[in-house]
Image (cartoon, rainbow, N blue to C red):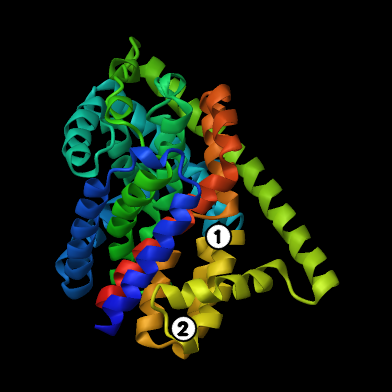
Amino acid sequence: MLYILHFLLAIVVIFSLALLFSNDRKKIRPRIILQLMVIEAALSYFLLHSSGGTILVSGISDFFETILRFAAQGTDFVFGGMANQGLAFVFLGVLCPIVFVSALIGILQHWRILPLFIRVIGTALSKVNGMGKLESFNAVSTLIFGQSENFIAYKGILGDLSPRRMYTMAATAMSTVSLSIVGAYMSMIDARYVVAALILNMFSAFIVLSIINPLSHAEDQQPIALEKLHEDQTFFEMLGEYILAGFKVAMIITAMLIGFIALISAVNAICSSLFGYSFQQLLGYVFYPFAWLIGIPASDALHAGSIMATKLVSSEFVAMIDLKKIAADFTPRGLGILSVFLVSFSNFASIGIVAGTIKGLNEKQGNVVSRFGWKLVYGSTLVSLLSAAFAGLFL
């Protein structure tokens, strides 16, 4: 009973924070939000109390790891096996595979498979979440392709999207993670928490965005010309275009990561000089009450708050590495809830990644997303808090 009361308190606080920055509170549909909460609660119970979900997502993850091994062969040929020596891991192991994934996306577009998936999956999800078909499918395609590669799939229609729909698309991308990297996550935190977060984040994003960025039914159903996803090209024309688009995206992300991480390091140094604490340490105290709010025991909350702050100002990878070092000091409940919180792309660097990716495909829309920067981090962080709160209900 105590866990239920704690969960209800977390829901009240998270929803209140979302309402503070709602675009239009009159358009919020309580029935849809309640419906999504019931579904997410059921999924939380299933994913955290059975092995079925873990087996399914682990199998999908193995499939994508196989794809990345194919991508690595091209990288090794060009860079002489540097990746195997542990050199330039982020560029060679994370960014270069975008080129190969982009080529696969182009093939799916050329064969008209993705537009079909958008209509089928988007229609099914939109009946549950009250959002448009494109936004609904985007939540699934982000899981499959990743937050940067995903937008390549929509490059033909990005220019047709309204700013509010662009916010929903970008916020969803920052609220989830790619199946292609869940294997790396599972090497640092318990696999079942990764599995749970993958699914819970999708529904948490629907809930939070239904509050922060509610659209009327007419806006949700605004038609998008999906035929633009397929251009009248020969197979090899298409393949060359998508390979170059993938490389362009990889270079833009590289530049954005260098700039954002360097700036964060500078802010950390300034705060350490002025206050004796880094920016991340100071944020740890800010996150302390939120750690307790989502169900992390008080004995773990301060350490958890610091790791949550590390995720925000650097990345989930850095935060998971830090957690792995001190995981033995956490209670099982605190470790599980914190692990679910960490599995998403909601951090400052992701602003640059998402905005840079979109800018590389459509400069005008990239500028639109850049103006949403702070609100994107805010919304996606609330998504992580909500998913962790649902996990705390059953841990």
Q: Position of residue 165 (x, y in %)?
A: 41, 31
Name which residue lies at 59% across and 36% down.
370
Q: Amino acid at mark 1?
A: Ser
Amino acid type of the residue that numbered disc 2 sits on in the rendered structure:
Ala
x, y percentage for residue 107? 31, 27
What residue is shown at x 20% (from left), y 62% (from top)? 43
Q: Is residue 27 above or below residue 235?
A: below
Q: CA distance from mark 2 to mark 1?
A: 18 Å
Front residue (pair 134, 260): 134
Q: Which residue is mark 2?
A: 327
Q: Residues within 10 Å of mark 2 (few under 14, many from 20)?
A: some
Quarter of the picture holding the N terminus: bottom left
Q: Which mark is residue 100?
A: none
Residue 91 shows in this picture: no
Q: Name the residue beneath numbered marker 1.
A: 315
Residue 54 position in % (x across, y down): 22, 66
